[in-house]
Every structure is written in C-alpha cells, then in structure tokens.
C-alpha cells in the first residue's frame, strides 16, 4: 500500500478510503481562489459493486493498493461453492456460489477466467469475450 494525495488518483487505480476498497473510475478537480481544491472521485466499491461519487479535499490521503489477477480454470460446482484451479501451480480456490450468480450462466468445464484478488480475498472474475455454449431446449 502506498499513501498518496487524492489528487494523484487516476482511473483504474484501486484505493482504500474509510476502510472500503474502491476502484477509481473517473476524477474531477475543482480549484477556486477562495477554497481548497475539491476532488470528486467516481468510484466502484469492489466488494459490493455499487458506484458512488466521493467528495474529497485536496489534502486527503488515500491508500493506493495493488490488485492481483491470475488465470484460473473452472473445475466444478460442489453445490455451495465453485472451485477454480491455477493451471501453473495447481492451487485450488473456492468462491461462494452467491458471489457468481450471473457468471454461472457462462461457466463451462475447463474454461479459463481471470480472477481478481486483493490480499487473498476474491473480488470477482472476468469471463472471456467468447464462450461456446450448447442449446439444450427451445420452444
């Protein structure tokens, strides 16, 4: 973690403010002659997915953090969790099924996805652009 001035945030930076992990989507700086610089940061809460606009002042410090991304293959669904495996280290991780409800529609056996993590906490996964699916039923 690196403590930096909020005016140095750029889109794509992950940072912690008030013990909440955010991703900077956009920022605007507003400086008038009579007041301190105001910084509006459009950010996404990486744990809940909600998008908010933070109003910070030019001297506020935020912790810029590094997110880890790794390619992992989908193994199986054990009912309550989904299991992925790193194809290089053979390390397996489990993700609660409730966090990946929408993504479950597109997971096929051995599909390789990018998993985003922060300090061994799984924040989400990025599906490939194209997924081959089979039509099972049609009216």
Image (tube, grey):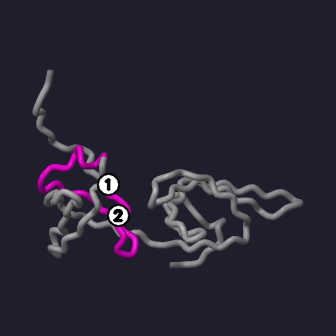
Q: Quadrant of the C terminus?
A: top left
- Residue 54, percent from left and from top: 64, 57
Q: CA distance from mark 1 to mark 2?
A: 17 Å
For residue 60, side relative to residue 2 (left or right): right
Choose top left, top right, bottom left or bottom right for residue 5: bottom right
Q: Which residues are magenta?
A: 102-125
Contact between labelled residues 2 and 1, with CB atoms less than 8 Å apart: no
At mark 2, the secondary structure is strand
Q: Of discs 1 and 2, which sits in the foreground?
A: 1
- Residue 121, percent from left and from top: 36, 70
Q: Residue furthest right?
A: 34
Q: Residue furthest front?
A: 80
Which residue in the structure is indicated by mark 2? 116
Q: Residue at x 70, y 57 (%)?
A: 29
Magenta segment: does it hold 108?
yes
- Residue 38, percent from left and from top: 74, 59
Give the answer, above or below, for where 105 lies relative to 119: above
- Residue 39, percent from left and from top: 69, 59
Label 2 packing within 10 angstroms: few (<14), some (14-19), many (20+): some
Indicate which disc residue 98 carries.
1
């Amino acid at each position: 973690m690196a403590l930096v001035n909020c005016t140095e945030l750029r889109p794509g930076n992950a940072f912690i403010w008030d013990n909440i992990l955010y991703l900077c989507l956009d920022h605007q700086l507003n400086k008038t002659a009579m007041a301190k610089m105001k910084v509006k940061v459009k950010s996404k809460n990486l744990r809940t997915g909600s998008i908010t606009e933070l109003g910070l002042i030019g001297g506020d410090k935020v912790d810029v953090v590094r997110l880890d991304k790794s390619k992992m293959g989908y193994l199986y669904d054990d009912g309550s969790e989904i299991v992925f495996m790193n194809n290089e280290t053979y390390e397996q991780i489990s993700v609660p099924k409730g966090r990946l409800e929408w993504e479950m529609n597109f997971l096929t056996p051995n599909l390789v996805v990018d998993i985003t993590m922060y300090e061994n906490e799984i924040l989400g996964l990025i599906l490939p652009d194209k997924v081959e699916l089979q039509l099972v039923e049609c009216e």
